[in-house]
Image (tube, helix red, strand yellow):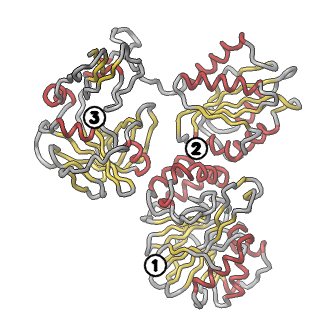
Amino acid sequence: MYCTRKITDDLTWVGANDRRLAMFEGVYSVPAGVSYNSYLLKDEKTVLFDTVDKAVRELFLENVAESLGGRPLDYIVVQHMEPDHSAAIMEMLAYHPGATLVCNAKTLGFIKQFYDFKDEARVLVVKEGDALETGKHRLSFIMAPMVHWPEVMVTYDATDKILFSADAFGCFGALNGAMFSDEVDFEKDYMDEARRYYTNIVGKYGVQVQSLLAKASAAPIEMICPLHGFVIRKNIGGFVDKYALWSAYEPEEQGVMIAYASVYGHTENAAEILAGKLSVAGVKTVMYDVSVTPASEIVSAAFKWSHLVFASTTYNAGIFVTMETVIFDLAAHNIQNRTVAIIENGSWAPTSGGLMRALLEKCKNMRFVENTLTLRSSLKAEQLPQLDAMAGAILATFPKPVPASGATAAVTGAIAREAMFRLSYGLFVLTAREDGRDNGCIINTVTQVTDSPARVSIAVNKKNHTHDMILRTRVFNASVLTESARFSLFERFGFSSGRDSDKFAGFEGGQRAANGLLYVAESVNAVISGKVFEAHDCGTHTLFVADVTEAFALNDEPSVTYSYYFEHIKPKPQPPKGAKKGFVCKICGYVHEGETLPADFICPLCKHGAADFEPV
Ligand code: FEO
C-alpha cells in the first residue's frame, strides 16, 4: 500500500524508510534507520526529484504511481547518482517512455557507468544556472560538486522558494510519522544525528559546502527538501548556521571530548581522573571508549567540541586498533582548529602518543598541549602532578572566567568589581518568539558594534529561557527602556522565568515588529530588531552578534541607565518579616536564609551572583 506525504499543494514526498539497515554505506550504524527521500512535483509537467535505494524500491514505485494518479511522468531530475538515491531510475524510464532525464554531464557519465544506458535522446543535460519551466514552477539548477560526490547538483524552485538540497541538510534516522523538522524536538532528539550525518558524509568537503551555502543564499529559501531526514520549513537560518560552523571546522561548544582506548582500564583511569579535574574547574567534558562507541559518533563529537584528548594504550608497537581507526577517520574528515592533548600508555615501549600526534599534526591548525602524559602500565601517585599540569595547560587555553566574588585590591592582575561598576549600561527588554510562544527578559548588554552595516551585540545569561530561544531561532527584539519605567515592568520581565510562566500574560504594552516578534511599547523609546549571525560561548553567557534588521524610535524620553534604576526605580530590598539570618539580593530582594552564602551562589530570581547579596 502506498505511503506518501503532502509537502505543499504541488509537492508530495514519495520516498520510503528503512529500519532494517544495520550499516549505512556499510560503515555508519543507523540504529534508528534512515529515510530515502524522493519528491514528486505535479505542475503542468510532472517532475520526480531522485529515486530511492533498492531496499525500498517496491514501495517507492507504488508511491510514485499513486501520486501521479494516472498522469505520465515528464521529468526525472537526478541530483545525486549514489545508489541510495538512484536505484530506481531505470524503472522510471521504462514505466514512463515519455520521461526526460534531467542531469548534468558528470551525472550522465555516472549513469552510463552504473547502468547499461545509451538513450541520450532522453537526456536534458543542464549546467550551472540553467532553468526548467514546468508550468507554474521555475526550477533552476545549482552545481554542488563534492557535496558528497562530484556530480551532485541541487535544485531551486523559485515559485515556492524550495531548495531541493540533495545530501546537504540530511539526517540519519527513519521518519516516524513526522515529516517536518518542526514537528519533533529536533535540537534535543535529532541534532546529534544531523551532525553525525554531516560530519561523516560530507565533513571532508567543508570548502565545497561553503561554496554551496554562498550560492544558495542568493535567493530566499522557505523550505529545504533533503534526500535523507526531515523537510525543513522553520528555523532555516539555524540549520544554515550549523552548516556554516561545521563546514568551517569551528567547534560548536567550548569543552573537552576525551576519547580513550584502554585494554585493562588503566588508561581509562587516567582519562577519568583528568575529566574530573577539568569538570571541577568548570569545563564541560564528554568521554568515549573508542572500542565501544562507533567511530562515526566520535568523529561527530570531535566536530562539536573545542578541545580533544586522546588517550591510548600501545598495541603491537603502535596505536590501539580502535583508536587508530578513529584518528584516521578524523584526519580523513578534515578535522581542524582544535586544541589537543595526548595520554599514552605502554608497559614496556610506549609509542602510541607520538604516533597519534604525528597523525593529528597533519590536520590543519591543531594546537597541542605540550606535556604528553606517558603511563607505564598504570597511573602512579607521583604522576598526579603531571596530570594536574595537563589539566592546567588545557584550562589555560579556555577564555578566562571573571571570578564570582570580586577582588577589591587595586593590584596588578586583580579584577575589582568596582571598576566594572563604573561602566555605564542601559536596560532593555529582550524578546524572542519560538513555536508561537513569546518570551522576554531584562538585559543590560545591548551594544552597537558597527554602524555600517548596522550591527549590535547582546550578552545573555544561559539560564534565561530567552537565551535558549534566541540560540535556536536567531532573532530578537531589544526594547530600550526609559526612566519612566515602573518597577513592575522589571518584576514582570526580570524576576521570573519564561520556562514557568507567560511573561506577556495580561500585558497590554506589547506590539509586534516586522520580524513578527513582540516588543515592549510602554516606557520604551526605541526598538531594535536583530538577526544573529554569530554566537560566542562566554561561559555563563552567550554573546550574540546580530545584523539590525529594523530599528525605530518611539519618543524622546531619556533611556534608563543601570545606576538610575538603582537610585530611582528599584525599591530598597526589605527582608521578609520573620526572616532569620541570611543574605538579601541587592538586585531583586530575594532572601537566601542561612549562616553563609556559597561563593558560587546564583540568585534564583534574577540570576545575579553572590557579590550582589548583602547580609540581612
Ligand atoms: Fe545519500 Fe551521497 O547519498
Task: Where is residue 408? Give x, y as percent.
Answer: 33, 11
Q: In the image, which disc is placed on residue 9?
A: 1
Which residue is at 44% across, 60% downward?
A: 234
Identity of the amino acid at label 2?
Tyr
Residues at discs 1 and 2 in contact (Cβ within 8 Å):
no
The quarter of the image that holds ligand 1 is: bottom right
- Find numbered disc 1 in the image and state the secondary structure of the residue it sits on: loop
Quarter of the figure with residue 321: top right
Using a 10 Å C-alpha cutoff, classify the residue at mark 2 as few (fewer than 14 neighbours), some (14 to 19) or many (20 or more).
many
Q: Is residue 13 visible?
A: yes
Tag in front: 3 or 1: 1
Q: Earlier in the sequence, mark 3 or mark 2?
A: 2
Image location (x, y in percent) of residue 68: 58, 85
State yes or no: discs 3 and 2 in contact (Cβ < 8 Å).
Answer: no
For mark 2, give the secondary structure.
loop
Q: Residue 504: percent from the left, percent from the top?
A: 26, 49
Q: Earlier in the sequence, mark 1 or mark 2?
A: 1
Please provide percent x and percent y for residue 232: 50, 62
- Whether residue 323 sits left or right of residue 534 in the image: it is right
**Residue type, mark 1 in image:** Asp
Q: Nearer the viewer, residue 400 or 172?
A: 172
Label 3 element class: loop
Nearer the observer: mark 1 or 2; the answer is: 1
| Gap between marks 3 and 2 measured at Cα | 32 Å
* Position above or below: 83 against 467: below
Q: Where is mark 3, residue-wise? A: 444
In which quadrant of the rendered view does residue 35 lie? bottom right
Q: Residue 407, relative to residue 60: is it above or below?
A: above
Q: Give the number of the disc on residue 249.
A: 2
Residue 376 tag number: none
